[in-house]
Image (cartoon, rainbow, N blue to C red):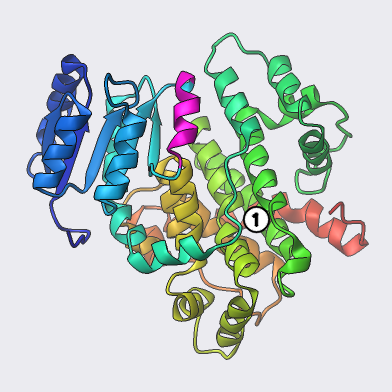
């Protein structure tokens, strides 16, 4: 099936609990003019429906008799690789989640809010035509280093599923990984966060960061640790890391200025810190080709994204988004990474994590990159107008200078932590 952003989307729900299927029917009845829905109570029936006519999205519960949701998405991946695959799962399903992480585009935590489910499906449909390209899939298959989700991230999520989990208990989980503990303490005490006193214990670090930002750092520190800079052909992992964390700090400042809720702010931080991970993956697996893309960019007629697409058939934006989509991170994070250089392609005229990541990425470079450097770019003010935030850009820039001042002072003094 050829997919375009305007084509009607066919969505299949699979759940052995018919009461839930009835609830989904009711929740999505207003969308029937835009989407074509089918509902079935068994995986075998779902496969027959999909063999008879293609679907854009399949949404399945994890726990079902005879064939589980994990087995279903694995089979769907073989038979219908173009179909986006979503699984509804609880934290108790982590073993099955691990089995099908490469076959699932999105994991949705249970219990699920219907509005969140509707938003996820909508974003998956929108991103599908961006990330479902065969060139991207083929390129991804060639990559030598593809980071996996760290087990520590799963353990923190599992603990947080209980309302009785304390800061001290989360800190104890982090302490089980001494290497990660040391990296988190080093980062918390660096100029990136600009604190006036030294933090020496994991409990203090968790209290300062908050569990959302802690999870983001566990994820990003693990991902960057998967790569060996000596094998990157002159590509600076340190430079990407510094820019990524600084962008995360700027993005958080923007989120606070716009009074964004805590959960969305956490998503913004994840997307900001990992927005350039596709660059590292490409440079690590194909250093000579990545150097060719850099030379093409430096020649002056291509942006970096255009040069990457010329050389690889896809840019670092799509590669990074594809990885996070496989991990099952929220669609808003995947969208922000996929489109952070081209936010106008989202098709959504709403202020979102994408809006913040796009602005934070450009503003950070404007402050920390020399004038005339090819990495510098301009904020898409026309896009900001569509989301009602163009008049906020100057305040965001002022806020960014404020939060980046400690890092700039550290750089001038030559006492960098990393």
**In terms of depth relative to the viewer, which is nearer, 263 or 164?**
164
Q: What residue lies at 80% left-to-right and 41% top-to-bottom?
A: 183
**In terms of depth relative to the viewer, which is nearer, 170 or 397?**
170
Where is the N terminus found, in terms of image quarters?
bottom left
User: Element at badge 1?
Assistant: helix
Q: Which residue is the site of mark 1?
A: 244
Q: How many marks?
A: 1
Vertical placement of residue 87 versus 171, above or below: below
Which x, y percent locates residue 56?
A: 21, 48
Direction from residue 137 to residue 169 in the image, left or right: right
Q: Bounds of the magenta span?
A: 92-101
Magenta stretch: helix, strand or loop mostly: helix
In the displayed orientation, state which residue is furthest to the front. 66
Q: What residue lies at 37% left-to-right and 52% top-to-bottom?
A: 388
Vertical placement of residue 372 versus 66, above or below: below
Which x, y percent locates residue 333?
A: 46, 46
Which x, y percent locates residue 365?
A: 64, 66
Q: Is residue 98 magenta?
A: yes
Q: Is residue 400 magenta?
A: no
Instruction: Residue 239: name its quadrant.
Output: bottom right
Direction from residue 306 to residue 408 in the image, left or right: right
Direction from residue 160 to residue 103 in the image, left or right: left
Residue 207 can be seen, yes or no: yes
Instruction: Residue 165: name its quadrant.
Output: top right
């Amino acid at each position: 099936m050829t997919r375009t952003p305007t084509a009607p989307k066919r969505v299949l729900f699979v759940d052995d609990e018919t009461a839930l299927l009835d609830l989904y029917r009711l929740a999505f009845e207003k969308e029937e003019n835009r989407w074509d829905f089918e509902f079935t109570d068994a995986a075998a029936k779902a496969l027959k429906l999909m063999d008879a006519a293609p679907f854009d999205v399949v949404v399945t519960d994890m726990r079902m008799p005879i064939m589980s949701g994990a087995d279903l998405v694995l089979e769907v991946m073989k038979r219908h690789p173009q179909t986006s695959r979503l699984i509804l799962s609880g934290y108790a399903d982590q073993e099955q989640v691990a089995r099908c992480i490469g076959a699932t585009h999105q994991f949705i935590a249970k219990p699920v809010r219907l509005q969140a489910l509707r938003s996820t499906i909508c974003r998956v449909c929108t991103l599908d035509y961006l990330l479902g390209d065969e060139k991207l899939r083929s390129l991804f298959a060639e990559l030598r280093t593809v980071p996996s989700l760290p087990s520590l991230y799963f353990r923190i999520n599992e603990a947080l599923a209980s309302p009785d989990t304390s800061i001290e208990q989360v800190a104890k989980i982090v302490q089980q990984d001494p290497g990660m503990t040391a990296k988190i303490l080093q980062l918390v005490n660096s100029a990136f966060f600009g604190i006036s006193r030294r933090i020496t214990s994991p409990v203090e670090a968790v209290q300062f960061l908050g569990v959302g930002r802690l999870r983001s750092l566990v994820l990003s520190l693990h991902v960057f640790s998967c790569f060996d800079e000596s094998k990157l052909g002159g590509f600076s992992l340190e430079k990407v890391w510094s820019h990524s964390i600084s962008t995360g700090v700027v993005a958080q400042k923007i989120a606070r200025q716009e009074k964004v809720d805590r959960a969305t702010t956490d998503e913004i931080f994840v997307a900001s810190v990992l927005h350039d991970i596709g660059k590292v993956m490409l440079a690590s697996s194909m250093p000579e080709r990545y150097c060719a893309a850099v030379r093409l960019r430096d020649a002056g007629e291509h942006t970096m994204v255009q040069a990457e697409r010329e050389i690889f058939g896809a840019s670092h934006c799509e590669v990074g988004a594809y990885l996070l989509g496989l991990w099952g991170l929220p669609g808003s994070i995947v969208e922000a990474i996929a489109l952070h250089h081209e936010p106008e392609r989202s098709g959504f005229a709403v202020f979102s994590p994408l809006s913040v990541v796009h602005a934070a990425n450009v503003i950070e470079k404007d402050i920390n990159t020399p004038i005339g450097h090819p990495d510098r770019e301009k904020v898409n003010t026309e896009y900001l107008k569509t989301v009602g935030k163009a008049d906020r850009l100057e305040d965001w820039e002022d806020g960014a200078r404020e939060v980046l001042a400690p890092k700039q002072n550290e750089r001038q003094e030559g006492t960098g932590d990393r």
